């Protein structure tokens, strides 16, 4: 039987899990250029940075108790900034069920040398959250980008916690309801759910995190890029548009375009609705095929953004060939699973992807699966 190529391709075959698809209708012509070539400390530069921060606050429905700052180094830089400035004031627990969580464990053990309690789970599974001791500071990823597993909610985070909750939320913000009263530190980057450009991270601090910064000085030296306090007080300018280092105003203006788009589709609720519709469309594709499965077996902890799939008996070589065929056909870009994860596909379902493109992907997966079948 001839394996015929499908007639319809996804209109926007951008399914990468970071950097992710630009929003529908995006064009470089939408980016305002007035701030380019200007100092980021000019009146205009600071106003645009503050506007970007204000839009993020509005869309995330973030309470006034929490501060938002734009920092260097994408989500990784933001999370490491938080770790280096606040950890070792009390014991630490680190949760790891995928590669980025393991990265924070490595930083804590090998760089900061603080010997955390580590609670692990295999790819596709979630650790026992009931084991967490909230007298500790707790490091975790809200959504495991490389495993497709997320925490189901914030109920497991103790309201009367003594330690701080540190949430790497880069694949979660703008896609889930996050209870901000349970989050002391959160980090993300524009390149994920917003489909923005890389290089910059976003750091969100709750009041307990600010208290830690103003009352605790770590034993190790801090590089200039990590210094959030001056004379024992928080540098409030960082959270009003005075960034620690020189930002790319082009990246900032691009983020503003997407944030304004998000506002136009119903804000936070609209972003969540689009993400859930995309994930549901992909789930239908999976349920209709006996050779395709979710890596995350439990729907309650299954990501709706970075959805990770396993293919019956497929090894990394076959996955690579499938992904290469789909890219060559312009049907799907960058969908091979993360290099450290089990062999499989990873398909981004965040809000900047169109549901019709997810639906159109199904027949192309069938075609690539058949084309790479063993002789």
Image (spheres, grey):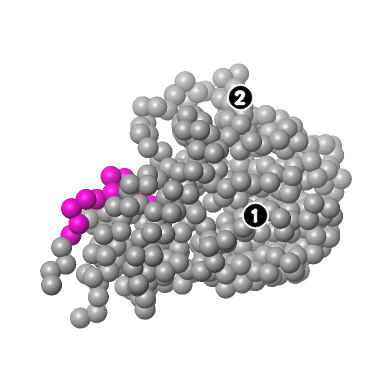
Task: Say the numbered circle drawn on residue 133.
Answer: none
The residue at the point 24 percent across, 50 percent down is 9
Quadrant location of the N terminus?
Answer: bottom left
Quadrant location of the C terminus?
Answer: bottom left
| Residue 355 appears left or right of 132 | left
Asked if residue 209 is positioned above or below residue 87 in the image, the reply reads above
> Is there any visible trace of residue 227 in the rendered image?
no
Q: Please rate how many residues cluster around mark 2, counting C-alpha atoms within 10 Å: few if below 14, some from 14 to 19, many from 20.
A: some
> Is there any visible trace of residue 62 in the rendered image?
yes
Which residue does the numbered mark 2 point to in the structure image? 46
* Residue 12 among those drawn in magenta: yes
Which residue does the numbered mark 1 point to in the structure image? 153
> Tag 2, which secondary structure?
helix
Task: Please state the horizontal and vertical placement of residue 295, each as a whole percent of the image.
Answer: 48, 68
Of residues 294 and 241, which is closer to you in this image?
A: 294
Please identify the quarter of the rendering in which residue 281 is found: bottom left
N-terminal of the two: label 2 or label 1? Answer: 2
Q: Please rate how many residues cluster around mark 1, counting C-alpha atoms within 10 Å: few if below 14, some from 14 to 19, many from 20.
A: some
**Boundaries of the magenta span:** 5-19
> CA–CA distance between discs 2 and 1?
35 Å
The residue at the point 78 percent across, 45 percent down is 209
């Amino acid at each position: 039987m001839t394996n015929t190529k499908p007639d319809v391709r996804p209109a926007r075959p951008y399914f990468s899990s970071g950097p992710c698809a630009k929003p529908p209708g995006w064009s470089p012509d939408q980016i305002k250029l007035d701030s380019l070539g200007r100092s980021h400390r000019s009146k205009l530069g600071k106003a645009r940075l503050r506007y970007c921060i204000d839009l993020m606050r509005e869309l995330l429905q973030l309470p006034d108790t929490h501060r938002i700052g734009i920092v260097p180094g994408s989500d990784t830089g933001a999370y490491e900034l938080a770790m280096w400035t606040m950890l070792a004031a009390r014991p630490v627990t680190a949760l790891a069920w995928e590669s980025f969580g393991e990265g924070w464990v490595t930083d804590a053990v090998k760089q900061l040398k603080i010997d955390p309690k580590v609670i692990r789970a295999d790819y596709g599974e979630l650790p026992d959250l009931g084991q967490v001791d909230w007298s500790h500071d707790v490091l975790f990823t809200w959504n495991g980008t490389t495993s497709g597993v997320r925490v189901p909610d914030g109920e497991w985070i103790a309201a009367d916690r003594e330690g701080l909750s540190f949430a790497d939320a880069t694949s979660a913000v703008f896609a889930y309801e996050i209870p901000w009263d349970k989050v002391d530190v959160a980090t993300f980057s524009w390149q994920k759910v917003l489909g923005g450009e890389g290089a910059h991270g976003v750091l969100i601090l709750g009041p307990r995190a600010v208290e830690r910064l103003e009352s605790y000085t770590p034993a190790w030296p801090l590089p200039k890029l990590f210094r959030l306090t001056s004379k024992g007080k928080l540098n409030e300018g960082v959270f009003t548009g005075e960034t620690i280092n020189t930002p790319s105003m082009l990246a900032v203006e691009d983020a503003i375009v997407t944030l304004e788009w998000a506002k136009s589709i119903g804000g936070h609720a609209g972003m969540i609705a689009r993400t859930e519709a995309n994930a549901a469309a992909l789930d239908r594709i999976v349920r209709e095929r006996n050779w395709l499965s979710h890596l995350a077996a439990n729907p309650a902890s299954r990501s709706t953004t970075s959805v990770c799939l396993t293919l019956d008996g497929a090894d990394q070589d076959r996955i690579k060939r499938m992904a290469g065929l789909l890219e060559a056909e312009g049907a799907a870009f960058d969908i091979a699973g993360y290099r450290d994860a089990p062999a499989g596909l990873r398909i981004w379902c965040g809000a900047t992807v169109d549901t019709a493109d997810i639906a159109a992907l199904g027949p192309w997966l069938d075609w690539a699966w058949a084309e790479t079948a063993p002789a």
